[in-house]
Image (tube, rainbow, N blue to C red):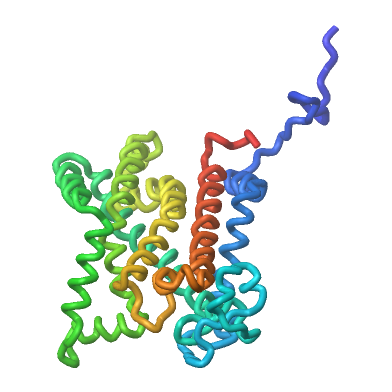
Amino acid sequence: MTKPVSLDSKEFGAGGKPISQKGESLLKDSIRRLARNRAAVVGGSIILILILTALFANLVAPYPFADQTLVDQNKVPQWVLNLFPTMQPYAKLSPNYFLGADYVGRDLFSRIVFGARVSLTVAFIGPLISLIIGVTYGSISGYFGGNLDNLMMRIVDVLYAFPSLLFIILLLAFFRSTFAQPEPGTFTYTMGQLDAATGGLLFIFIGIGLTAWETMARLTRGQVLSIREKEFVEAARTLGAKNGRIMFRHILPNVVGPLVVAETLAIPGYISTEAFLSFIGIGVNPPTPSWGSMISDGAQVIRTYPNQAVFPALALAITMFAFNFLGDGLRDALDPRLRGTQ
């Protein structure tokens, strides 16, 4: 005779573990799997520390980033001299600078701290511009399809024909020459003042924004093409929902996850682009500190004072690794196909 099953009894799966009867939301499951990803947690912790450092740079940095003390040029503390013994014949000792001073006596540690503001600003503003332009463009192309989709994607193909970095350099050269000596009260004068107030970052944002959205537009188009034929979208159309409501209430919420993950993985590219532009001298305006410009200055004396290039390069590398780790963790955590596998 079959034994009746009690309503309070539990079903057991592999390994004798009880199978939970209560479902877990996708968000909670994603957060749990993200928290179990050690690399992502380490990356997120480093990014949080960098954000706090950038926000409170005036409190963290012992000196203003532009202060020059010529008598202290190229001075280093003892531990730096021990780390780089090849500096012995050239360096002058001083305990006043934690990482040493540069060729005009500016504190390296203070400039690295303030340089975090530049890199993190690019890390967040660049993806924001790319998302706004790319998602809007790709959504329109993918949703309406047909000849409009074909035309819009051919425009993207043409823009893809230009090397992005070269295109940004040309744009920056155009912006800087156009807004160099404008008449007061004009639009060009206002743009030039805004660029000067941001230390040269405004035109970098514009250059990155005008070149970085193509990939996001293609990705958004592909996601929208796959979602627009789903049953719930067809049901919304049958009930008389307008295109705008279908787009914002049904399609975009289902594609925003992969798009955010893709932009998170693209952040190191934005940071390296800004660093390269500053390295070749067309990035931020001096004396605004950028890790790229600091590496460029340090590269000229790397045989005698390697600390001036190595420390900002380490800051840049650690930041890019942190965003890569966090991006990989978000991709794994937000992938529905991995739900319940960890």
Percent coordinates x, y for residue 113 in the rendering = 53, 76
Percent coordinates x, y for residue 193 in the rendering = 28, 86
Percent coordinates x, y for residue 149 in the rendering = 19, 44
Q: Residue sitting at 26 percent across and 53 percent down?
A: 137
Q: Which of 208 and 313 is in front in this view?
A: 313
Q: Nearer the viewer, residue 22 or 290?
A: 290
Q: In this view, does 12 lie above or below 211?
A: above
Q: Nearer the viewer, residue 68 or 191?
A: 68
Q: In this view, does 203 lie above or below 254?
A: below
The extreme front residue here reads 89
Q: Residue sitting at 41 percent across and 54 percent down?
A: 266
- Count of marks placed on residues: 0
Q: Residue sitting at 50 percent across and 79 percent down?
A: 111
Q: In this view, does 103 lie above or below 143?
A: below
The N terminus lies in quadrant:
top right
Q: In this view, does 203 lie above or below 247?
A: below
- Residue 279 lies in quadrant: bottom left
Percent coordinates x, y for residue 123 in the rendering = 44, 64
- Residue 267 lies in quadrant: bottom left
The extreme top residue here reads 1
The C terminus lies in quadrant:
top right
Residue 238 seen in render: no
Residue 26 seen in render: yes
Q: Residue sitting at 45 percent across and 86 percent down?
A: 104
